[in-house]
Image (spheres, rainbow, N blue to C red):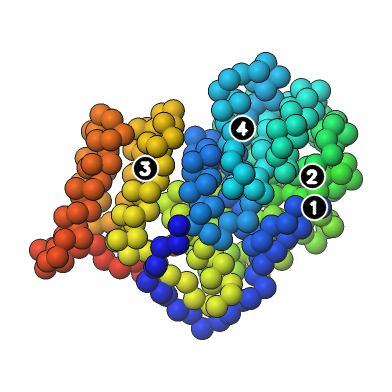
Amino acid sequence: MQLPLAPVSWTNRHPMLFEELQIRNVRLRPAQILAPMAGITDTVFRRFIKRLGGCGLIMTEFVSSEAMVRQNSRTHRHLFYEEEERPITAQIFGADPNHLADAARMIEDLGFDIVDLNLGCPAKKVVKCGGSGLLRDLPLLKTIFQRIRAAISIPFTVKIRSGWSNEEIVALEVARMAEDCGVEAIAIHPRTRMQGYSGRSQWEIIAEVKASVQIPVIGNGDVMAPENALELHSQTGCDAVMIGRAAPTNPWIFRQMESFARTGSYSQPSEADRYQLIRDYYAMLIAEETPGAIGKMKQFASWFTHGVRNGTELRRSVQSAQSPQEVLARVDDFFGRILAPGAEDAGLAMPAFSQRESA
């Protein structure tokens, strides 16, 4: 699905920016990664992003190693994928070294390309049994690295935060330990667990890690537009970029970054592009009878319609719908009026997006 977008031109070109990354036998081209996001990166959303272009690696929602060893049916649903999603990483979390090793083996048996360990989630219910909570117990973390590495033959990567708090920054120590234990790439979100998603990402921590290890370093945090990806690379020298929260609000970001790197320009979506995109995603959810489809549709409308003129009207309309089919009908009605001939004269047309608005 390649939608024609309105161009935005810039004077500089950066043809080598995140062009390619090899993690052992797994080739990322471009080296632009969709971050794992709970409740978002299911198989439908991953394929949706993949079809838009520019995303070299996608990741599942994180799954609990404890739930995996208990054969939890919901967890197995999170691990469903289609061949078109390759290369694909499954991310696990937990704190028991043996159960994490067992879960990693199961992921390899399911045919995933990479196993990733979550060391970044700040949620209270997760840090009690893994996630960024493990950054406070490095001896245990070393054992976990060693057990997972010994259990699987496919590439093993990790995603970390910079530390628990500003007084407990451990990114460099964890990266060196990970490399020593056979971890093959490390993604860094340089906020602490205590920060959550507030404040700014400390990209200098990514730069420090990049200068200190030989394995690939993936930068994450505060990349909301192609220009941010360029700044991240310039300031850190990281080998790849990982996009999280920007993807649901601007699913074109991967394609835009790839275009910006190659040509020095990228395109912005028109109102017709936005309509087609949201409709395609909703149609996929309905066609595949996705569990909780109406909730996902309402969630996506909240992200995707900000900046759209009269978007509040659409969000309100979608939120009150009672079925997925009703959501789709209301979207069709809204954009039918917005895109109708003469709508601009009537004050209904949506403005073209400027670079500032896209960031």
Q: Is residue 145 visible?
A: yes
Residue 311 numbered mark, or none: none
**Residue 21 location (% of width, % of height):** 73, 60
Give the mark nearest the N terminus, 1 or 4. 1
- Label 1 – label 4 distance at C-alpha: 21 Å
Residue picked out by circle 3: 283
Instruction: State yes or no: discs 1 and 3 in contact (Cβ < 8 Å).
Output: no
Residue under numbered circle 1: 25
The residue beneath circle 2 is 155
Tell me whether the residue at label 2 lies in contact with that at label 4, contact meaning CB atoms closer than 8 angstroms. no
Can you tell which of label 3 and label 2 is closer to the viewer? 3
Residue type, numbered disc 3: Ala
Report whether residue 119 is seen. Answer: no
Residue at 63% across, 56% down = 56
Mark pair 1, 3: CA separation:
35 Å
Q: Secondary structure at mark 3?
A: helix
